[in-house]
Image (cartoon, coloured by chain):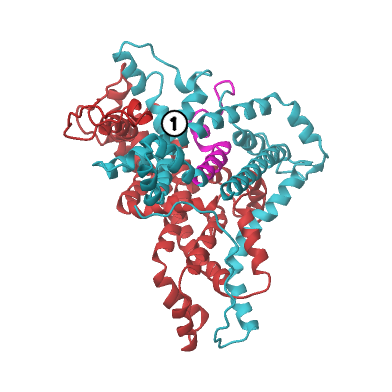
Amino acid sequence: MASRPPTPITISPAPHRVRRPRRAGPRHESATAWTFIAPAVLVILGLSVVPVVWSLLLSFQADDLVTPSRWVGLDNYDALVRDPNFGQAVRNTVVYTALYVPLSIVLGLALALVLNQRIRLVGVYRTLMFVPFVVSATAQGVLFSFILDPEFGAANSLLNRLGLSPQGFLTDPGQALFVLVGITLWSGTGFCVVVYLAALQDVPPSLVEAARLDGAGRWQVLRHVVLPTLTPITVFLVLWQTINALQVFDLVYVTTKGGPLGSTTVIVYFVWEQAFKNFTAGYGAAAAYVIAVVLFVIAAALRIARRRGQAGAAR
Amino acid sequence: MTATLVTPANRVAPAEAPPRRFRLPFSAWHLLLAPLAVLFAVPLLWLLVSSVMTNAEINRFPPALWPHGIDLGGYAYVLGDAMFPRWFANSLIVSATAVASNLLFGALGGYAFARLRFAGSRVLLVLMLATMAIPFQLTMIPTFIVMRELGLIDTLGALIVPSLVTPFAVFLMRQFFLSLPRELEEAAWIDGCSTIGVLFRIVLPLSRPALTTVAILTFLTTWNDLTWPLIAINHDTQYTLQLGLTTFQGLHHTEWSAVMAGNVITVVPVLLAFLGAQKAFIQSVTASGLKG
């Protein structure tokens, strides 16, 4: 597979300032450029920069999306801290993320390492592992509510045939969140496999060869040559999977609607519920802001860690 | 199991003499990989199987694990439904528009950022890059209000407008254009070709890989999205397939074969696209790491 592993976008390679023959003056070029970027600027800035500021303002207001809103200062944030449902949503999201992110990455790496060998049917395995990734969360949710249906589902039918007791799965408050992690692992591990496989193509064979010649065994090559080369990819995957896990919504909406007993209410579900079901949009915006700040801090911390890591490697 | 498998023992201590080798006709890794592959495949296989079962087979206890014959009743039910075909068409309209407009506006914007000089280009570029990091839940409430003020709520327009062009499409195209040699474009400039002519006649024909990536990822995200349609659409004539499917499941929760047939219909377009262009798909998804 010739695909490139993900590389962070850099702004630095600015268009080189080579004098080139132009028919028109800079004024003309500038006008053309603005025409070209106008749609993108309008949509992207209009529907993300403006809403970000708007959301912040909303979070200081009481707003039901219908009547004019009223300024309430920090009341929404104050109420959030005391809201046990928000606390539960945060806990559920953290548990979900803390399970899904490491498991998907470790499984993805292990499978990619196995698939990176010269064995037959690698293409078939890769396809089968990746296919669930393109299936929408809605379709996954509908499918698994059926498979895991306590009465009519295939899972309990199978357990029954094996002589095991039937399970509640998504209807059991003690299991539901873990079942959701399982479903996301089924659909999301393939992504890590594919990204790692692409990255493994870029491990310089000469480096591995040199380590072998120095008497390193398979495990040592993996530990001291391959894994360090993959570090940037791993950092990217941790960041990527964490962002996605903290924002899980569709699957929850389709399967459990946050239940049973709030055991799968995650943060985005909480925000959605507040804004579009209870019509307390200001309160929802405040919750969204809290999460956004947490996400931002995580991203910044990872970025700093990566930079330190690079500085360490350079030394 | 011991045959060609590298045991932990000799991985840790490679100096020891390798164990005697019995040759399996295939690599021992298959003993691990094959069951795993089955685990990944079974839910989707089950989706297909249950869509051709009868409700009687599904609703008895314990439910059947294999159909007695192929029953297309579920498909007939779904396709005869007053709304389902319409939802399919709605999804197709929204996705196709998003793909076309992302290709066009992504290329235009990307080309301006890659090749044209204009005041404020770097600031705008950084600003756009920053917007990719904004989580959707932060923008969804104001976006809803904006769409309502535009009178678009409960129309497909509310779904189309926010997905007209993504910063990702602009960036991906910019990065790709920067990797192209300038000589061809310069020759065309000298020959008196206009900027738009250079872009459409010289640059875009060379940009198939980047355009494919934008098309695939745009299709995948718009076709599969549930969150935004759920917020922006109330009336069932304007549902997308994802929104329709979950509503349909809620209304017909005992008619599983119809729900599963609907589910197959929802998944098939993406699956066909994936199987048809698998290599491009996997490359595109890997390239989405650019967003990190």
Mark 1 is surrounded, within 10 Å at the Cα level, by few (under 14), some (14 to 19) or many (20 or more) other residues, namely some
- The chain to which mark 1 is attached is A
Can residue B234 be seen by looking at this rendering? no
Q: Quadrant of the N terminus of chain B?
A: top left
- Decide whether residue A295 is among the magenta residues: no
On the picture, is A249 further left or further right than B213? right
> As shown in the figure, which amino acid type bears the numbered disc 1?
Ile
Instruction: In this rendered view, identify the residue nearer to me: A12 or A59.
Output: A12
Mark 1 sits on what residue? A183
Q: Which chain is cyan?
A: A
Q: Which chain is red?
A: B
In terms of depth relative to the viewer, which is nearer, B153 or B179? Answer: B179
Residue A247 in sight from this viewpoint? yes
Q: Quadrant of residue A72?
A: top right
> What segment is highlighted magenta in the picture?
A233-262
Q: Nearer the viewer, residue B208 or A117?
A: A117
Residue B66 percent coordinates (x, y): 24, 26
